[in-house]
Structure formats: C-alpha cells, structure tokens
Image (cartoon, rainbow, N blue to C red):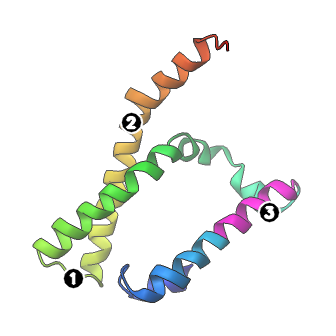
Amino acid sequence: MAGLALSGLPTNDPFISTVGLSWIAGFFACTLLLSRVSKQGCVHYWLSRPALKPVATISYGLYLIQGPTMAVRQSILVERLGWAATGWEAAGVNLLTLIATVLAAVISWRFFESRFIRLAKNHNYQL
C-alpha cells in the first residue's frame, strides 16, 4: 500500500488503474476477512478499537463522497490551476481533499443519513 502511494504514478496511469486498484481491493478484502475469522488476532484487535467508531459511522458517506471530491481535486486544483501532481503541493492538495471529504461525510451523517436511519427504525414494514 505504501509503495503504491509513494510511487508517484498518477491515478490515471494504466498500472494503477488495473493492477494497483485490484491489489488495493484484495488487500482490504483480506483485512476484513482476517478481522472476521480470527477474533483473537491483531487485525480484529486493531479494527475493533473504539477510536475507529466515528470513522465507521461516516464510512458510507465517505464512500459516496470521495469520488466527487477527487474529481473536483483533479479538475479544478490540478488541471485548471496547474498544481503539480506530485511533491509537497500534491500532499497539501490531497490533505485538503481528505478534510473536505470527511467534513462532507460528517455533515451528510448529521443532517441526512442519521435521520433516515431513525425513520426506518420507527417504521413498521408489512408486505
């Protein structure tokens, strides 16, 4: 994972778009599998820490919002403003993108998702 992140390859590179993304998906699938299979293992221990609960709470919002924020990052900040795709400038842009994504996911949870979940719990479904 660190090697892919530090490789400096752009996200639209054919290697990243195929092998890289597949490797990342496999890594996370194995991590989730390990956390569920072995309740005594270190993966389960670290993934069940209370400090991760806020991230788990907004995880669906993060999933939905990360695509649009990455597209905005690429089109506006990198292509229009001409910021470098690598180096310290890219790290700053990526940090701002991460902060915007998390903030949008928190707002989504607070004002939309939690209310819909509460409505669903109070609704009596019958077929």
Asked if the residue at tag 1 contacts the one at tag 2, i.e. Cβ–Cβ closer than 8 Å, the answer is no
Q: Is residue 38 magenta?
A: yes
Residue named by callout 1: 84
Circle number at residue 114: none
Image position of 86 (left or right of 116): left
Which quadrant of the figure has residue 99?
bottom left
Main structural element of the magenta stretch: helix, strand or loop? helix
Q: Which residues are the magenta region?
A: 27-39
* Residue where numbered disc 2 is placed: 108
C-alpha span from label 3 to label 1: 38 Å
Q: Are marks 2 and 3 in contact (CB under 8 Å)?
A: no
- Residue at point 58% right, 74% down? 24
The residue beneath circle 3 is 34
Q: Position of residue 12 (x, y in %)?
A: 36, 81
Percent x, y of residue 14: 42, 87
Label whose residue precedes the other's in the sequence (2 or 3)? 3
Q: Is residue 14 above or below residue 80?
A: below
Q: Quadrant of residue 57?
A: top right
Q: How far apart are labels 2 and 3 at the CA level?
A: 30 Å
